[in-house]
């Protein structure tokens, strides 16, 4: 139809394309995905466009070549175009341009961008690339000063090479080391840091098991560079943590048992007893007592507490680090809890094990890298042992929260849930350092967490569930009736109003109040503003509520006819209201005080059986309804509210249990 209408020949040279930011071509495979209202454009076919760009990127003009590479990088996101360009041996052309080393800056950046986009479609195998190309890409990464865009694309290419080919891993590993990647982690560009971490992950995952274990289990760094490499592996990729997390403690391993002895020694400042000091039973009893104070589950042989994986030996490593590097805090926590009643004791050993497991879950230690995960925590770049320091901050937070909750041993899981929420909320703010994390955790006390929970429950989907909505609908009439009674009571108390006159402002007043039976309005003039209530007997005029027909407000009020008096007396139009009596007689009321205006309009509408619509009513409804909902749901704290009511049980086989009134 398009070709016939516009008299276009050679229809194979044209195609339809989405006229949005994607610019994807419409094909038989994706045409059913076109949404109603989508704008399409008639443009050059993918094969024609690929041929043109293939020729343009070889131009001798640098400006023309740069524009062509920009267009190529943008178009290569479309798999239809990518297939056509690859068919023209476009990948080989791009690799030759990189290997030649003649392009720099933006030219090189867009060349690598186009290469990455084309390879992401999985059409071409990664095994086809030469060593010269790999060396060139690795060279861009190894340079101390390199364009940010070029460095980012080069890191992405190296990661893909390592992950997609074992042979390429060997070649990349020969060209680049962890030590050469470290400088890129010390900058401030988060994208570069993220891509660098991805390359480290890829190199570690593809490394042979024996080589990987040699790096992890190296008992002593051979030099500062090796120490920094281990730090990078531990902090940024958590591979060391994963290994320790999945390592069970061997109760027969004396070195591991010595760590537990060290924890006991630091906590209670005991000297190593000689083997012949006291009877065996006495020493066992003393050890059991101390291990109980340290909060281990197994008081006789605490090594058994670390046989569960996760967290395995990682929990013991954290406990030892805390005891050695934060000795005062460690001793205070242990002694403070050991002096409490058993049920109020926060067990340090058990808490440390569960906390370590929780931190591994939060930071996804042991999970494979995911491209869908964009969590980035700058604080892990600020300390050589940041995970251990993170643990030290959190174990002190756990002890503090335990005291704030006045928890007992039965509340252990509840405390851990609150601590998880505190940590997660602090991490979402992306603290730049461990000190910032500590500061934010201090502001997230148990009381503050309860306030946040209550606030969020009013706005979250749980509060929009069917049972909650039904409860709101049930409560609203009760709240509205309460507001109505309050308004009528205020009318019964009466209000003094200033009279409006076309003359100069005069201090004359009149008073109006509702009778206790809500059937008559009593009103009359006053010489001065009263100090208290005015009795019904002193008000000469009466207006039966039955004769009232409507309440007129704002611009519809007949006061608007007396614009001169309104202006002279500085009366706001928004605070005017009138009573329509028998549809012909009006009684004029003017209240320059907004609360009085709302109370009287609401009260009069309530007397007429009409809806109360003032802002005060809406505010009171929101406040009272929120309070009542919180009170009703107080007993359901931490209980999941179902979306639908439970099923009705089957009828009983007989009704013999029913009491016969006769």
Image (spheres, helix red, strand yellow):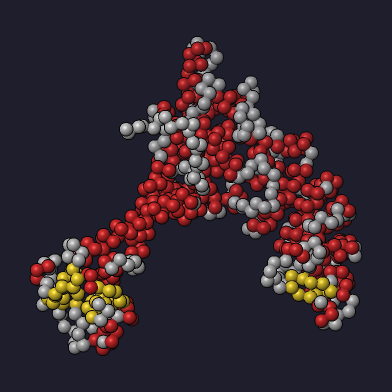
Q: Position of residue 366 (x, y in %)?
A: 66, 40
Indicate whether 390 appears above or below 555.
above
Q: Quadrant of residue 609?
A: bottom left
Q: Residue furthest top?
A: 279
Q: Nearer the viewer, residue 411 or 504?
A: 504
Q: Position of residue 394 (x, y in %)?
A: 51, 42
* Quadrant of the rendering where the N terminus is positioned: bottom right
- Judge left or right: residue 255 versus residue 412: right
Q: Position of residue 400 (x, y in %)?
A: 43, 40
Q: Which residue does the image show at 14% across and 66% down from the upper left? A: 533
Q: Position of residue 162 (x, y in %)?
A: 79, 49
Q: Which residue does the image show at 39% across and 32% down from the upper left? A: 658
- Judge left or right: residue 74 versus residue 274: right
Asked whether the viewer can see residue 192, the reply is yes
Picture mark count: 0
Q: Nearer the viewer, residue 399 or 283?
A: 399
Asked whether the viewer can see residue 588, the reply is no
Indicate whether 83 appears above or below 645.
below
* Quadrant of the rendering where the C terminus is positioned: top left
Q: Quadrant of residue 410?
A: top left
Q: Which residue does the image show at 87% across and 62% down from the upper left? A: 86
Q: Which residue does the image show at 26% across and 87% down from the upper left? A: 562
Q: Nearer the viewer, residue 553 or 245?
A: 553
């Amino acid at each position: 139809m398009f070709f016939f209408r516009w008299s276009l020949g050679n229809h194979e040279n044209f195609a339809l394309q989405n006229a949005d930011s994607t610019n994807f071509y419409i094909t038989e495979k994706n045409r059913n995905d076109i949404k109603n209202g989508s704008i399409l454009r008639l443009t050059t076919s993918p094969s024609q466009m690929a041929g043109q760009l293939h020729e343009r990127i070889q131009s001798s003009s640098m400006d023309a070549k740069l524009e062509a590479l920009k267009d190529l990088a943008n178009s290569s996101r479309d798999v239809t175009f990518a297939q056509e360009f690859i068919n023209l041996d476009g990948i080989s052309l791009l690799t030759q341009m990189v290997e030649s080393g003649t392009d720099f800056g933006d030219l090189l950046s867009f060349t690598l961008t186009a290469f990455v986009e084309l390879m992401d479609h999985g059409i071409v195998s990664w095994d086809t690339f030469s060593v010269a190309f790999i060396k060139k890409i690795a060279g861009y990464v190894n340079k101390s000063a390199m364009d940010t865009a070029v460095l980012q694309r080069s890191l992405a290419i190296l990661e893909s090479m390592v992950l997609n080919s074992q042979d390429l891993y060997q070649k990349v590993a020969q060209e680049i080391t962890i030590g050469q990647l470290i400088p890129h982690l010390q900058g401030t560009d988060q994208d570069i840091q993220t891509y660098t971490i991805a390359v480290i992950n890829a190199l570690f995952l593809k490394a042979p098991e024996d080589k990987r274990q040699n790096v992890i289990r190296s008992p002593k760094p051979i030099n500062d560079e090796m120490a920094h490499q281990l730090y990078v592996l531990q902090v940024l990729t958590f591979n060391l943590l994963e290994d320790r997390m999945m390592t069970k403690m061997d109760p027969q391993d004396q070195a591991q048992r010595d760590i537990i002895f060290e924890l006991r020694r630091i906590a209670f400042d005991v000297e190593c007893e000689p083997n012949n000091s006291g009877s065996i039973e006495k020493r066992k009893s003393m050890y059991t007592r101390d291990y109980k104070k340290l909060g281990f589950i197994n008081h006789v042989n605490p090594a058994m507490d670390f046989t569960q994986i996760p967290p395995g030996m990682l929990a013991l490593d954290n406990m030892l680090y805390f005891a050695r590097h934060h000795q005062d805090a460690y001793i205070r926590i242990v002694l403070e809890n050991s002096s409490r009643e058993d049920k109020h004791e926060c067990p340090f050993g058990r808490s440390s094990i569960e906390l370590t497991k929780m931190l591994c879950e939060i930071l996804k230690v042991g999970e494979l890298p995911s491209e869908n995960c964009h969590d980035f925590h700058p604080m892990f770049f600020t300390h050589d042992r940041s995970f251990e320091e993170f643990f030290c901050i959190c174990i002190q937070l756990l002890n503090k929260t335990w005291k704030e909750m006045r928890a007992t041993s039965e509340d252990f899981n509840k405390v851990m849930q609150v601590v998880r929420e505190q940590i997660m909320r602090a991490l979402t703010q992306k603290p730049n350092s461990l000190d910032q994390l500590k500061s934010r955790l201090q502001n997230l006390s148990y009381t503050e967490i309860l306030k946040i929970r209550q606030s969020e429950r009013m706005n979250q989907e749980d509060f929009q569930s069917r049972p909650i909505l039904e409860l709101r609908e049930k409560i609203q009439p009760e709240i509205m009736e309460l507001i109505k009674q309050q308004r009528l009571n205020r009318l019964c108390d009466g209000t003094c109003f200033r009279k409006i006159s076309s003359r100069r402002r005069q201090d004359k007043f009149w008073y109006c109040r509702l009778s206790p039976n809500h059937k008559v309005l009593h009103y009359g003039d006053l010489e001065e503003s009263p100090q208290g209530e005015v009795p019904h007997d002193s008000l000469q005029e009466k207006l039966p509520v039955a004769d009232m027909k409507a309440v007129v407000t704002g611009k519809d009020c007949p006061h608007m006819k007396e614009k001169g008096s309104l202006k002279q007396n500085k009366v706001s139009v928004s605070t005017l209201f009138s009573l329509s009596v028998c549809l012909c007689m009006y009684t004029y009321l003017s209240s320059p005080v907004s609360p009085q205006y709302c109370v009287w309009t609401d009260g009069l509408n309530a007397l007429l059986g009409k809806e109360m619509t003032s802002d005060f009513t809406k505010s009171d409804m929101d406040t009272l309804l929120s309070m009542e909902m919180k009170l009703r749901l107080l007993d359901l704290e931490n209980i999941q509210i179902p979306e639908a009511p439970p099923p009705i049980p089957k009828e009983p086989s007989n009704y013999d249990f029913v009491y016969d009134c006769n």
